[in-house]
């Protein structure tokens, strides 16, 4: 076993014990109950048959056994069901804890890592494991392993009794049945299917692990497609209006077909191995029935013992099969446990900075992009190419350009959601990577075009926390133009947004959601403000009002505004024009119009639109 496997196995067991101390003890108890339960029927049924076959049968004893059998069987079934249900509850709670830790890791890791498709697929894979793989699977494997051991132990005692019972008489058959070779043949015939299953299991383990890796991408696509198209009601409008049901179902079937094709080879090989194992087991069972039957004929034991010993041998075989299946699953699962902790232990590069962002820096700052080049993971071409620019406190910048020109990437690099592959970004002459990451993030109040409004209360959405300054939150909402809507809400800041958790939840329009996002930006009151097309869902009048308010709010701060409506650039000190990842022009609105360059083309393309507004 690899040292990392041993280490992570120990971590997994410690986590199970720490999170839910009752899981492993309950698994032990349930294993004992499950192992003992089949022997109630085997032993008592055999005793009843012996009593019935005896010429001196005792009626009272027979009635007692007849009542004891269903009574103990019922108690065993109830104990089994109770322990099983309780263990299932504990496992479900632990599953949610593990899923929560995976989700927490996703939002705590570097944004660049979280947005990496490879890490996203890995996260989705971990979230699909549930009971069958990873840390939680160890509880089930502990249960199965102990159940197998208990079963084998009980069966071994009874099998020894079977061989210890001597056939009577002086016939050759009796001598043969009493000979030690009978035990040797029993062990050989028993060992052959067991060894066959062990070798087959080891082979299938590697095959299915490789198939799991191969199927990871189509499985992620299948579940993402299913969730987004069939579980999110927002998608229902387009699906219905454009009659996309057949297309969606076709895509789901195609993706499901790819998964089935990947696993088909593995299932066929497994089926052939199972067929061979079944045949060998049948041969062994045939020997057992012949051996036990002949021993009973030769007077070694009563007719009821035929049921006892054949049932015992069957349980022994089941126990051995379960034991080796569990060992196979355990060995395979070590790789999944290792994957879980490898994901959890992924280091954050952004956590490496040590310098504090002091109040002096917040009071007077200059940002510099120096020869910055950036390419998204998996992209064929860079989004920014040798970008150079400088801006400082109090300066208002407008960033304009066509879609895909690099505007939002420029903002993400400034906020250090990504780090450039080439060049550097400086804050007061120091590479921003040298600053403490959390303190650096506190430098910015931002509203991105793909902002998120959460299914929390209105006040919590603005303040991003449960304990907040109500007066300040209210003022931020009014400054963002949400005042009239706020006054119409019966519960005010305590209004639950959306109906995921409450039937009384309020649905916001696109424009209202953007105002709440802007209010969040105002509430944070950071030294630098970034608005990445925050007014796309607002009408021109509301947009002009928002920009006027924001300009007043940021009068002593630095600010960057990204907007496709160039009329919003009038009040900015400088305009940066992006094209194909480069800044091709910069200057004031009037100067850029006179330059007759890219900005002038964009402006005249919208001139009639502005005139109508």
Image (spheres, rainbow, N blue to C red):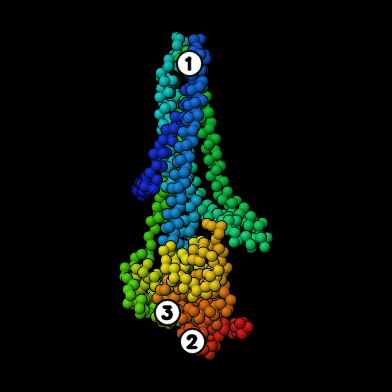
Q: To which residue does mark 2 refer? A: 588
Picture coordinates of residue 117, whole percent (x, y): 49, 61
What residue is at 44 percent from the left and 20 percent from the top?
A: 162
Quadrant location of residue 148?
A: top left
How many discs appear?
A: 3
Residue 420 located left or right of residue 452: left
Q: Determine contact: label 2, label 1, CB under 8 Å.
A: no
Picture coordinates of residue 557, whole percent (x, y): 41, 79
Camera sees residue 364: yes
Q: To which residue does mark 3 refer? A: 558
Q: Which label was assigned to residue 61? A: 1
CA gap between label 2 and label 1 equals 106 Å
- Quadrant where the image shows the C terminus: bottom right
Picture coordinates of residue 167, whole percent (x, y): 45, 14
In the rendered view, would you say 121 is above or below 524?
A: above
Choose the circle earlier in sequence order: 2 or 1: 1
What residue is at 56 percent from the left and 77 percent from the top?
A: 542
């Amino acid at each position: 076993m690899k040292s990392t496997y041993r280490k992570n196995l120990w971590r997994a067991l410690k986590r199970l014990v720490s999170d839910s101390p009752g899981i492993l003890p309950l698994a032990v108890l349930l294993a004992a109950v499950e192992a003992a339960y089949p022997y109630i029927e085997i032993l008592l049924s055999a005793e009843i048959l012996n009593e019935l076959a005896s010429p001196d049968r005792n009626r009272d004893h027979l009635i007692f056994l007849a009542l004891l059998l269903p009574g103990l069987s019922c108690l065993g079934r109830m104990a089994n069901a109770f322990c099983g249900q309780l263990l299932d509850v504990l496992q479900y709670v632990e599953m949610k804890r593990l899923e929560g830790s995976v989700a927490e890791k996703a939002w705590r890791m570097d944004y660049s890592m979280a947005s990496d498709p490879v890490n996203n697929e890995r996260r989705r894979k971990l979230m699909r494991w549930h009971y069958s793989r990873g840390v939680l699977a160890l509880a089930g494997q502990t249960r199965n392993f102990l159940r197998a051991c208990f079963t084998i132990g009980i069966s071994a005692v009874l099998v020894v009794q079977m061989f210890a019972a001597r056939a009577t008489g002086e016939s050759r058959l009796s001598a043969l049945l009493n000979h030690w070779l009978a035990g040797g043949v029993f062990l050989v015939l028993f060992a052959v299917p067991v060894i066959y299953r062990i070798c087959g299991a080891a082979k299938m383990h590697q095959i299915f692990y490789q198939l799991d890796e191969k199927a990871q991408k189509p499985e992620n696509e299948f579940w993402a497609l299913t969730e987004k198209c069939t579980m999110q009601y927002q998608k229902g409008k387009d699906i219905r209006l454009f009659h996309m049901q057949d297309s969606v179902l076709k895509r789901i079937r195609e993706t499901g077909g790819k998964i089935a094709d990947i696993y088909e080879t593995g299932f066929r090989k497994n089926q052939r191995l199972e067929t061979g194992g079944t045949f060998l087991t049948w041969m062994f069972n045939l020997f057992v029935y012949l051996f036990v039957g002949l021993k009973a004929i030769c007077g070694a034991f009563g007719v009821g013992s035929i049921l006892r010993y054949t049932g015992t041998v069957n349980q022994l075989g089941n126990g051995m099969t379960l034991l080796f299946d569990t060992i196979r699953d355990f060995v395979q699962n070590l790789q999944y446990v290792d994957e879980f902790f490898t994901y959890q232990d992924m280091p954050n590069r952004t956590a490496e900075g040590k310098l504090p962002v002091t109040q002096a820096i917040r009071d007077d700052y200059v940002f510099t992009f120096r020869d910055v080049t950036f390419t998204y993971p998996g992209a064929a071409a860079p989004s920014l190419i040798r970008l150079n620019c400088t801006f400082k406190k109090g300066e208002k910048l407008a960033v304009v350009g066509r879609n895909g020109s690099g505007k939002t990437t420029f903002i993400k690099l400034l906020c250090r959601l990504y780090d450039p592959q080439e060049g550097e970004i400086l804050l007061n002459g120091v590479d921003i990577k040298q600053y403490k990451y959390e303190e650096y993030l506190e430098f910015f109040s931002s509203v991105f075009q793909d902002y998120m409004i959460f299914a929390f209360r209105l006040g919590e959405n603005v303040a991003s926390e449960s304990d907040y300054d109500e007066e300040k939150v209210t003022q931020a909402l009014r400054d963002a133009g949400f005042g009239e809507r706020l006054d119409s809400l019966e519960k005010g800041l305590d209004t639950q947004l959306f109906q995921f958790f409450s039937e009384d939840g309020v649905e916001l329009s696109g424009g209202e959601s953007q105002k709440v996002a802007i209010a969040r930006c105002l509430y944070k009151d950071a030294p630098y403000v970034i608005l990445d097309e925050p007014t796309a869902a607002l009408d021109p009048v509301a947009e002009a009002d928002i920009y006027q308010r924001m300009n007043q709010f940021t009068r002593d701060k630095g600010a960057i505004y990204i907007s496709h409506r160039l009329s919003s650039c009038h009040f900015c000190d400088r305009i940066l024009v992006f094209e194909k990842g480069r800044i091709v022009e910069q200057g004031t609105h009037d100067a850029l119009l006179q330059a007759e360059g890219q900005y002038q083309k964009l402006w005249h393309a919208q001139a009639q639109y502005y005139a109508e507004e």
